[in-house]
Amino acid sequence: MTSGSMGSSPRRPDGWAKVTGTFAFSSDLSMPGMLWGATVRSPHPRARIVGIDVSGALALEGVRAALTHLDVPGAPCYGLELRDQPVLAATEVRYEGEPVAVVAADDPDLARRAAEAVLVTYAPLTPIVDAEAAARGEGEAVHAGRPNLLRHVPVRRGDPNVEAPVVVTGEYEVGMQDQAFLGPESGVAYPADDGGVDLHVATQWLHVDRDQIASCLGLEPERVRLTLAGVGGAFGGREDISMQIHACLLALRTGRPVKMVYRREESFRGHVHRHPARLWYEHGATRDGRLVYVRARIVLDGGAYASSSMAVAANAATLGVGPYRVPNVRMDSYVVYTNNPPCGAMRGFGAVQACFGYESQMDRLAHACGLDPVELRRRNAMTTGDLMPTGQVVEGPAPVAELLRMVAERPAAPRTTAFGASGGHTTRGEGVVRGVGYGVGIKNVCFSEGFDDFSTARVRLELRDGRPVVTVHTAAAEVGQGLVTVQGQIARSELGVPDVVVAPADTAVGSAGSSSASRQTYVTGGAVQAACQAVRRQVEATTGEPYDPTALPRLLARTGAVEETVRWHHRPTKGLDPQTGQGDAHVQFAFAAHRATVEVDVELGTVRVVEIVTAQDVGRAVHPQAILGQIHGGTVQGLGLALMEEIQVTDGGIRNPSFTDYLIPTIMDVPQMRVELLELADPHSPYGLRGVGEPPAISSAPAVVAAVRAATGVELSRVPIRPHDVVWGAGR
Amino acid sequence: MTFHSPTRWADALAVRAEHPQAVPIAGGTDAMVELNSGRRRPDRLLDLSRIAEVSGWDTDGGTVRAGAGITHTAIVAQLAESAPALAQAASTVGSPQIRNRATLGGNIATASPAGDTLPTLLACGAAVELHSVGGARTVALADFVTGPKRTQLAPDELIAAVLFPAATGPQHFSKVGVRAAMIIAVCSFAVALFPDRRSVGTGIGAAAPTPRAAVEAQDFAAEVLPWDSLGHLDPAVAGYFGDLVAKAADPIDDVRGTAQYRRHALAVIARRALIWAWDDLRGAVPCG
């Protein structure tokens, strides 16, 4: 086998540079003659714009442009699903931090001062912030002429009026989590001789950025060229446009390169967050704990603009009863407009909120039936051939019971106290109790509901200095997950050539789709595999000989360079019936289970996690070390949601837009983690692999909360858990 | 921007006198945040990080004089015996990188209600030594900090040192936060026992406009602790001490916690800290 092939863990090319601090992130880009852009943002969550006066900014020496909505040459609005978001607000602002004008100046501080010198006159309006009222159709419209209800996804299965001897109900709340990537939104745009523009930017999907930029600039898409710059984390927060169009507008207006880098506070207002949610669940079961029905209502606050809210609502609906067999389901998922910060994609994408609801319910049901929480879950665990509430047959492996068994059978966590090693010297054991909790989750992999989801790969095989070299070119965004390494591994495995170059991702090749939905190894991996196979076939067809890696110097001397570009689609999906929510909407399902052991200081309400055990089916471990990294990182992101991560919003305003007060777990908060993998091949996916990135972020939060409940006996119905919730109960 | 970077203390005082608007910067862990965020755009910075004269500490056995430029890392490593609570507090500040840069003088000058070293210094009855080209004066820390991020520092003065009695008994510092590191205190508390003079010092952090002592609590403890017998501390006494500490606080609701929780948590950590300190004292006395 060629060294660095599938199943090994070759070093990632960016690893050394990132560890030593020499990696160039998008915020490190520089060009000669470069200007700096800055954004004028609304201080109000909702206001009418009475006037915008940029003359004060332009009067400053060294300020080269100050643009408003009047300077947007093409479509005034953009958006992933609905084009509802203005490039620059014209008549009304709908969230705190909405861009109203942009400026370009000779240095970054001058640009900031110029932004402060733009005079915007607002007539503030009372912000619409009650998502539940919006879901009921009450209140003023956030967007005039459009209902605040963005989407309602019903799912109906079985008998809507069925009864059960054991019934548990619960009401749950999920706070607004942030992706909290470290690299702020940033990039450099520069004008091109053809009247177009080039943009180097950190993003998750080059082509969908390009299409939105081109539309708003009034340019043909071919004249807008994007190259992926170093991405400092994404987690969904870079699916939407941030500074892309603004930088291009400024570059085209000034005729010079323009760099934009958000400050940290600006970043918190400059990207979408995870939808906060309210969830109502009723579970009915037999006395021996077998689910008879689930009735649920989920309200997701989409904030001011649609972003990917409609797809998030569909995920919450279709995955909202969890990885369980439920014969009767009545589910209603709603997502609404408000004047709260816009929400969109974040790792887990609707499945995270639902999982906190249904896993909390499964613990309640276990208690009501007098069953162990693992046993209750095992009795209801779905398996291959079972039906989703949408009527879709679960075709691939669905080892839910097996994953639960794997985490449950691990030895108990070590007795070492988690409060001893770190923290604020608050206890020597006083008040500390320990608890164990479980969570299991389900996630769809790839885009759903009939979306034309594909990736494009160009693979070239040629001789360089007599040695065969493979070049892989895709537009797939390496966002830190290790996709560049995976593309090289696939090419080595398929072509038997050790020398593989992965070209920089740009729009000179066709779309790869988004680095989201745990899909890139599946879809771009599938495209690279298909392109490599096409190259092999072409070598064989041209030479009339079987493909043989050891004979490549001779074969390629006859063929010359061989290049193939393949657009690869996964199996098509279907839309959901708008009345019943029935339909084969998803491509693949992924599962993970967690067991968390926590210590709680019940007097202070503080929590430390002692250990998390997790098990996940990855289908095929393409790069085992990267998989471990995904599982560690996702699990910790869930721990963060359980215990500390929340954007606090009052009357539409963010109260903690900084890493001082938006808390993400530090290494001192990260417990011992034990990871177990299953590799059960999916017959439909390339190499049998299964998307890995999201499942670890879904069930870890419910497991941590369950452990805190087990330790304290306190009903905790909200994440993140706040110390006062533990001390005095969750307030419900 | 003009950047003054003297290497001698006298030169720093001269710059300060000539340019009182120059922003002093030592470790930069507070000042640079202000600069980077654009909240401050000073024309001049006065860098104090190269002045060896104020970066060390010494003691005559009774009093410790810690230079304003001593880093939190140095405090943890070198002052754990003479100022155990201060060293504990310093160890809870930020990350190793921040502790390597951040100075004691900076923490005092910032005068945040949540400044971690301040409650421990209050518990010891510390004073600040202020220098200017015109001379020196010493002010009790409790008087020096006048409000949230406000001090008595005159425009021509710099903090030269902090003076406090070396520990003669156990001390403890506790800090409540939902994260195990890199956390601004939701509330904090320091207690210092001085068995030689049978006194108890306290300091409350992040639960009032300034760090403050819990005077009633410390007087109560000094009065009722069984100094002669070194007997067991009655849990009810520790509990009442905690309640008095909570009563001395004047907390607010903010993104880090509610006023009600802060009071509650203060009572808990104050009770625990007094018990630990007393148990340490009893354990430190040789048997029989």
Image (cartoon, rainbow, N blue to C red):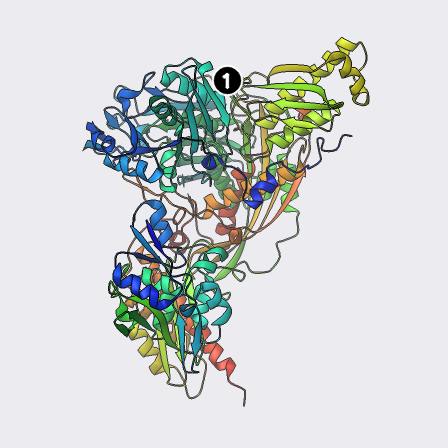
Q: Assess disc 1: are there few (<14), some (14-19) or many (≥20) residues with their C-alpha within 10 Å of its C-alpha.
A: some
Q: Is residue B159 above or below residue A699?
A: below
Q: Secondary structure at mark 1?
A: loop
Q: Is residue B248 above or below residue A168?
A: below
Q: Residue at x 50, y 54 (%)?
A: A608
Q: Nearer the viewer, residue A137 or B219?
A: B219
Which residue position holds label 1? A451
Q: Is residue A101 visible to the viewer in this orientation of the structure? A: no
Q: Nearer the viewer, residue B16 or A54?
A: B16
When asked about the image quadrant of residue A455, the answer is top right
Please state which amino acid type lies under the numbered disc 1: Phe
Say whether residue B21 is left or right of residue A429. left
Q: Residue at x 40, y 70 (%)?
A: B67
Image quarter of the C terminus of chain B: bottom right
Residue A706: x, y in percent? 51, 47
When asked about the image quadrant of residue A80, the answer is top left
When asked about the image quadrant of residue A2, the answer is top right
